[in-house]
Amino acid sequence: MTVIGWLQIILYCAIIVALTKPLGWYMTRVFSGERTFLSPVLRPIEAGIYRISGVDEKREQHWLTYTVAMLLFHVGGFLIIYGLMRLQAVLPFNPAGQSAVAEDLSFNTAISFITNTNWQNYAGESTLSYLTQMVGLTHQNFLSAATGIVLAVALIRGFARASMRTVGNFWVDVTRCTLYILLPICVVFALFLVWQGMPQTLGNYVEATTLEGTKQTIAVGPVASQVAIKMLGTNGGGFFNANAAHPFENPTALSNFVQMLSTFVLGAALTNVFGRMVGNQRQGWAILAVMGVLFVAGVAVAYWAEAQGTSTLQALGLTGGNMEGKEVRFGIVASALFAVITTAASCGAVNAMHDSFTALGGMIPLINMELGEIIVGGVGAGMYGMLLFVILAIFVAGLMVGRTPEYVGKKIEAREVKMAMLAILVLPLMILGWTAVAVVLPSAVASMANAGPHGFAEVLYAYTSQTANNGSAFAGLTGNTPFYNLTGGVAMFVGRFFMIVPAMAIAGSLAEKKSIPPSMGTFPTTGGLFVGLVVGVILIMGGLTFFPALALGPIVEHLAMNAGNVF
Amino acid sequence: MEPVHKPNKRMPVSAMLDPRIVVPALGAAFTKLDPRSMIKNPVMFVVEIVAALTTVIFVRDLVIGGENLAFTFQIILWLWFTVLFANLAEAVAEGRGKAQAETLRKTRTESQAKLLSGAGRDYKLVSGTSLKVGDLVLVEAGDTIPSDGEVIEGVASVNEAAITGESAPVIRESGGDRSAVTGGTQVLSDWIRVRITAAQGSTFIDRMIKLVEGAERQKTPNEIALNILLAGLTIIFVFATVTIPSYAAYAGGSISVIVLVALFVTLIPTTIGALLSAIGIAGMDRLVRFNVLAMSGRAVEAAGDVDTLLLDKTGTITLGNRQATAFRPVRGVTEQELADAAQLASLADETPEGRSIVVLAKEKYGIRGRDMAELGATFVPFTAQTRMSGVNAGGSSVRKGAVDAILNYIGGGAPIAIASGNAARALQPAALSEAGREISAIADEVAKSGGTPLAVAKDGKLLGIVQLKDIVKGGIRERFAELRRMGIRTIMITGDNPTTAAAIAAEAGVDDFLAQATPEDKLKLIRDEQAKGKLVAMCGDGTNDAPALAQADVGVAMNTGTQAAREAGNMVDLDSNPTKLIEVVEIGKQLLMTRGALTTFSIANDVAKYFAIIPAMFLAFYPQLGVINVMSLSSPQSAILSAIIFNALVIIALIPLALKGVAYRAVGAGALLRRNLLIYGLGGIVVPFIGIKAIDLVVVALHLA
């Protein structure tokens, strides 16, 4: 580990914290329906959209209506992507002449993109047409991100409102989120990326003659526009198979740094939106502090593990840490940091091969995802996931102050606990369940690139990543088989929507409750004690759930490696 | 009544574990194994199921021959112990209530009732059980009141020891706020005519029996929520354990069912699952020992959440009676004269106020008591119309009463001749108004200082004011400061005028007050507070309190109160001591805290159990995992056995805490949380490491594994 390395990490955190407040202020205005500096330009477009689609923007929805609207919206999204993939051969914008995508892969990919997972069992440049990438995937990159954000906002409204039956209007929220937040940032961001050397073209792939005289096809395309939303919306689906490790998808150290910033910035700002909406920004900072503690701890372990290298590498005379699977232009710190960020948020973009990380270094991304991606998390999803954990933490420990647990003025009662438990159950069910099936199924085991605990970790990572809607791959595992496509699709679907529906039920139930003014007897939720408590509950809950699986994967691998066994 | 702390009612733990309670509880622990009753407790029900399943497997292995039978047998034994210990905790908690119910039942002996047929006193003897609601009965000295009812005629002293444990008789009379009588209590003197308000089986005592026995115990909202959490955790651990064999198979190993079951049972929150209902029952029981009956567990929980406490001034904040503290004459009158007149007016006045005037006159001015008969004086009693009292002696008359009443009496030309005669009457208002103004000024001053002014007039001439003062109870200020630290706002309710109320409120240290309160004002205040999201507690006894009692989240009715009040409240204080609301709140908080503390402890315990069982489980095929065995437990079998033994014994060890409750301190939520997190959170992580290691040493020493 180096001082420069740590300075990079500190700088990163500092910029995120600095952006949280102004962006939180702006987003709060957007979701409160207030005027912003972009209103003169965007308001006519927004009003036009409502007119055409017949949405009454003044009319708010009950949580159930809101959720049903969201679900219908996703059914539509699924059908569009599935259709495009199956029919791309006969549709325009297919200069490379890609053929129709198989049914199981189309299913997996469609689910993957509507759930903001962007798990990719395909290589983009050799499978998808430009039309599929742009109309199917990029558009879902926007909308699945917007959906995540507006659901978090709906839950926040649940906390902020009192004695109300509605939580907002889904159509209005999605429109405003896309128009006022995602699009403007992406336009600027994409231009920046182009400046950094990223292609943005609808032209054909480029033919190049190498020094040896052989012909090489260089894939290009509308990369910058997709990468901007891929990172900002924590989608993570790469334009190219190598994702952010590809020089066209992440050309420079600067583009790498800004991409990392864009992954966290909206998620972090949502904590401030929460604080503002519940009327006390310190509530938001406390949540961000919980995320921060877990994040910095993860970065420290991953950076240490990668910088340390392994005893095996050292035995071979390789010093300077573990560079296997990492891009030289990023180095160890930017790779370790990227890996932690991409899994803490449910981004899933990778700029290094997680499979090649040391056992412990690779365990951090795994743990980040198993905790439910609540460390900043996927845009919106991280916020509502974190609030579910807060509800549980408050419920368990809040009793210890001698009152029915309450959080930001809302009593946490049977309904909230039930829904929070339901949502959290999804993680072990999908992750542990499917892993248990896959590791005893000979055909599924055959997909592993490595044997022993490392192969186990590959499968565990695959289901963890999909359930948590991350989308990053440990690599190594050949995921494009009917088994992995279908089970993975189910994991992504359940991991997304079986978390959303309970979260929305909580939003509805909270909005209807009265708000209790704080008193001396109220559990204080802005201080270090609260932060420590939530961190503790998250680690213990996550630890208890996944410890056996982790013990059999990365932990045993690490121990074995120290003993000279590699897999 | 002074704030009552009855130390004898706080039962020490040793008494809770009285053999008379524990021995029958041991039996009950076995009868409670009935799955139909176990299913109410999801966590323990699951343990019972796996215990039964493993027992079946064990028997099969015994017959066809299996390995490690001794080890398996021990694990199964401890699984059953875990279930039995949980049942024992519940049975012990119920035991105390059962004993109390037994005593109550004795009072419900078959009694004869004197059923009245008409307005007269003709009755026929019928069985108490045949009474219907609305029947009229006569109860005479020595009779037991056959059922709950309302006194509609007569006054009697009643021994209510059967329900309150207090042997001093209380007065029950028709009209007013002391008209409710309880079946099973005994009339000591005089007679009363009672209208029956409850049929047999639904009387107050019947309800008490059911409550203390826990027969109708329903899960409270928070308990339900907690049960959901525990069930959810159990499901998580189902996933975590049932997937292990598959992972092990991949790694080329296998794991026996008994080891998996051991891991599962140690992981699921058995500690809190086992003690949850005991905590609830013990909470209700603590209230009963305070002589407060909660009609539902919901009310006890609500008590912990109370934000606003409405307290009646009289009897709660101040001693019931106002006392004379000074004589303040108008100009031209000496204190001595005023004291003399006031004493004369109060000689025959048996009210506490009247007596306090006589006492003050004697103490301060040496005026001796005089005999009314000797003076030839006649007493003019207080009536609601005149609002004054006094004496007529010889040609002179003395009156004392409310300032406006006295002014009115003088100004209006009362039956007594006014000294200046009829001719001067025209001038009278002006003359009076000058003395009247002075009186009013003094009265205002007295009121501002929290006192009540009582004007005294002799022969139509205003003499001055007797200052009566409410005496704030000793120590009440500290109680309110404590409540403030608990985050509870206190509001004093009084019929006094705002100035007097403000002064007393300041002296007592309440946060707010409601002056000249009518029952409607009270109800409105509660509704307003509730609209702000606050939970309100109050106590009351009168029929006009009933709507407010019903509206309040915690309504404590005084046992001496009317039937209407007792029906409206969700708690009844058998001692009729309004100050007890504070203890009720504390008990509610204690109940919630105990649940939270044991849940936290239970979950934190799991960390150590993983460190014990995981390495033991996988050692055969991944020996590297031996480094996780931080407790260096001697063998895989002893590790697993120690974990499951610890898991069972910790239930027994925590029964006293569950019954006694975690101590509540009014130190603010932050400090309280820090303290409890340290003890039950951090302690919960550390204790099992030590405990399991210690048990492992014993297991090895005894060659159990």
Image (cartoon, grey):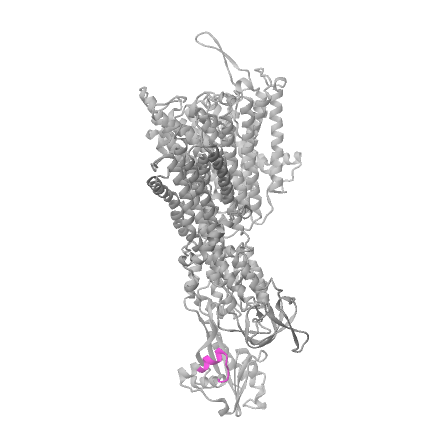
Q: Nearer the viewer, residue A108 or B434?
A: A108
Name, please, the residue furthest toward the right: B118
Q: Is residue A218 above or below residue A167?
A: above
Q: Position of residue B432 (x, y in %)?
A: 53, 83
Residue B596 drawn at (x, y percent): 45, 49
**Residue at the extreme front of the image, as rendered:** B63
Q: Report the number of numbered marks.
A: 0
Q: Position of residue B63 (x, y in %)?
A: 48, 34
Query: Relative to A183, is A62 above or below?
Result: below
Is residue B351 rendered magenta in the image? yes
User: Which contiguous range is marked in magenta?
Assistant: B347-358
In the displayed structure, A441 sits above or below B283; it is above
Is residue B343 among the parts visible in the rendering? yes
Which quadrant of the figure contains the C terminus of chain B?
top left
As drawn, B69 above or below A195: below
What is the x, y in percent for residue B124?
66, 74
Q: Nearer the viewer, residue A310 or B87?
A: B87
Give the camera-side residue of B296 and B58: B58
Residue A285 seen from this side: no
